[in-house]
Image (tube, rainbow, N blue to C red):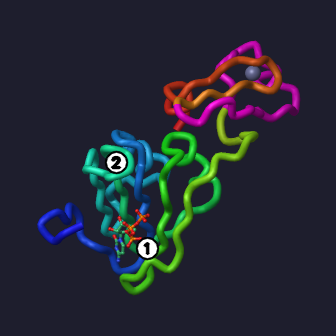
Amino acid sequence: MSETMLYVSKIKDGTVIDHITGGHALDVVKILGITGKEKRIITIAINVPSKRFGVKDIVKIEGRELNPQEVHKIALLAPHATINIIRNYNVVEKQRVRLPSIIEHIIQCDNPACVSNSNEPVKAKFYVKNEEPLLLKCHYCSYIMEKGDVLKQF
Ligand code: CTP
Ligand code: ZN
């Protein structure tokens, strides 16, 4: 990308979440619990041109790395996202998010009658039927959850 096309500046140390599905940057920010009150530099780019995907979003966070639970949540909304770890301005690690074929604990089943919502010690469990558009099927009641249903829980 040429200088005239640089939308957001490089960061020194931290994490760049790149190739986020267009329109989902603010959902990613929410997943990470970023409120804007932190004394960190946060850069958010929405609907910037991308060769591979047409448009994409980017979130850059100075001085912070992500935990596996956060990465799994991001994968639900943005299965093509890449997580870049930056140290001293260099990309030292690049990882594409990966959606496991079975999702446990991260979200609840939306079916109130589902056994995973009863007092039984049964934790929610879903099979990933499709990544994009997202389709999750509950292991217990076969209820289908879509991206919008998942978003409401974040
Ligand atoms: N980046 C950054 N600050 C740095 C280094 C990189 O903000 N000090 C950003 C880049 O702007 C880019 C992402 O981190 O959005 C990944 O950087 P890089 O691997 O250099 O870019 P690409 O090769 O375009 O990445 P990819 O192959 O994943 O598309
Ligand atoms: Zn269920």
**Disc sitting over residue 14 in the figure:** 1
**Disc sitting over residue 76 in the figure:** none
| Residues packed near mark 1 inside 10 Å, few (<14), some (14 to 19) or many (20 plus) | many
Q: Is mark 1 within 8 Å of ligand 1?
A: no
Quadrant of ligand 2 in image:
top right
* 100 relative to 66 in the view: left or right: right
The residue stretch that appears in magenta = 108-132
Identify which amino acid the numbered label 1 is placed on.
Gly
Seen from the viewer's position, the closer of residues 14 and 134 is 134
**Disc 2 versus disc 1: nearer the observer:** 2
Say what secondary structure mark 2 lies in.
Answer: strand
Which residue in the structure is indicated by mark 2? 56
Residue 79 in the image, given as x and y percentages of width and height: 53, 45
Seen from the viewer's position, the closer of residues 126 and 55 is 55
Residue lying at 69% horizontally and 16% vertically, measured from the top left? 111
Q: Residue furthest front?
A: 51
Residue 69 in the image, given as x and y percentages of width and height: 63, 53
Residue 67 in the image, given as x and y percentages of width and height: 60, 62
Prevailing SS of the magenta stretch: loop
